Image (cartoon, rainbow, N blue to C red):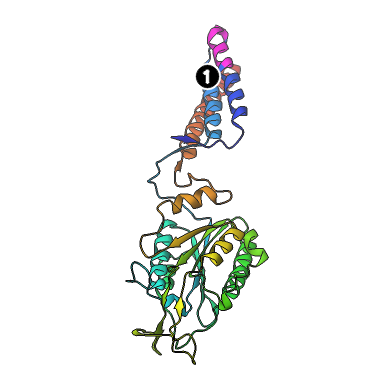
Amino acid sequence: MIFRPIIPIAWIMIAAVLLFGFALFCLIRKTMRHGYIFRRIIIIASILVAFLRPMVGNESVERLVSDLNLFFVVDNSGSMATKDMEGGERYRYEVAKADIKNIIRMFPGARYSMTVLDYNVYQSLPLTTDASMATAAGDAIRPRKSNATAGTDLSDLLEFATKRIVKYNKRNPDRRSVIFILTDGEESNEKLTELPEQLKQALSTGAVIGYGTTAGGKVHRVSNTNEILENEFILESTLSSEYHISKLNETNLNNMAGKLGLRYIRRDETGELPKDLENYFWENAKNTDSTTGKMDLYWAIALIVIALLLWDATVVAHKLALERKAVK
């Protein structure tokens, strides 16, 4: 059992000492040894315990995150069709999709939204409480038809996402916004992503997750039916015979995470999301109660207080009834 006081604990301790002193006084003075006095002492003591906010449960209890808005901001541009993850066995976008599913499982009961960049930027999933719909939106991520390199502008992606996050925050100011930016960080002209000024203020916490390797890999072509062509790769330009090599841009991603006050996670060729990821968000989200998943005991204390009050009221009513009979 743990306690999360809802008023300063010093006040509770002072009240408890005074109550204990009064109870001791009543025990010593025979004239004060009345059942109704001790009943009311117990009622006050129960209320003080309620102020301590006792909770039960353990860390394995599923946390309730009904006040979280999770925003997935996903780079689905052509470079995510590079097969340099897990020793060259998986495409970047495949690992990103798996991460989205795992994050959704980490935060059951939250609301989910998804913004995607491929040919253009769009919201593929408006804010919803439906985890299966969010998972389906993640499953739908797949690089689109591409035959040549095209400039990726992550600034547009983040600008679009910021407008949606700010809009949702205004609708529900009591909810916390958590962002997951999934990208390889590759920008057109190798520039750093421009970050909207409003974005940092709109967020509670989040992470920038980088996909790929610094050595990079050749980007696969994608057919008209959005199928990845295993043995065909995108050229550096229409006039070049050199294949385009896409590399994880950690400079860009670290800059992005630093300015937004987020954690940067490198998803290199092997491994899974860090096991401490869930705890990290609970520890860093603003106004977060890390024991949300524990069960409050308010209801049990309330039942005790109600039972004692009914008992006391019954005794008083019976006493009044006897007094009326005596008067008659």
Residue at (41%, 71%) from the top-left corner? 92
Which residue appears at 59% of the width and 28% of the height? 12
Left or right? Give the position of 165 relative to 238.
Answer: right
Quadrant holding the N terminus: top left
Is 144 rendered above or below residue 103?
below
- Residue range (magenta): 21-31
Can residue 328 be seen at all in this image of the molecule? Answer: no
Q: Indicate the position of residue 299 as horizontal and vertical percent values.
A: 48, 39
Q: Residue 8: where, in percent of width, then height?
A: 61, 33
Q: Mark 1 points at which residue?
A: 38
Q: Can residue 243 be seen in this view?
A: yes
Residue positioned 66% across, 64% down in the render: 198
Direction from residue 97 to residue 257 in the image, left or right: right
Of residues 68 and 92, the one nearer the viewer is: 92
- How many labels were placed on the picture? 1
The residue lying furthest to the front in this view is 241
Q: What's the magenta bit mostly, secondary-structure-wise?
A: helix
- Mark 1 belongs to which amino acid? Phe
Q: Residue 18 falls in which quadrant of the image?
A: top right
Kind of element beneath mark 1: helix
Q: Position of residue 113 (x, y in %)?
A: 51, 68
Q: Which residue lies furthest to the bottom in this view?
A: 239
Which quadrant holds the C terminus? Answer: top right
Nearer-the-camera pick, 191 or 222? 191
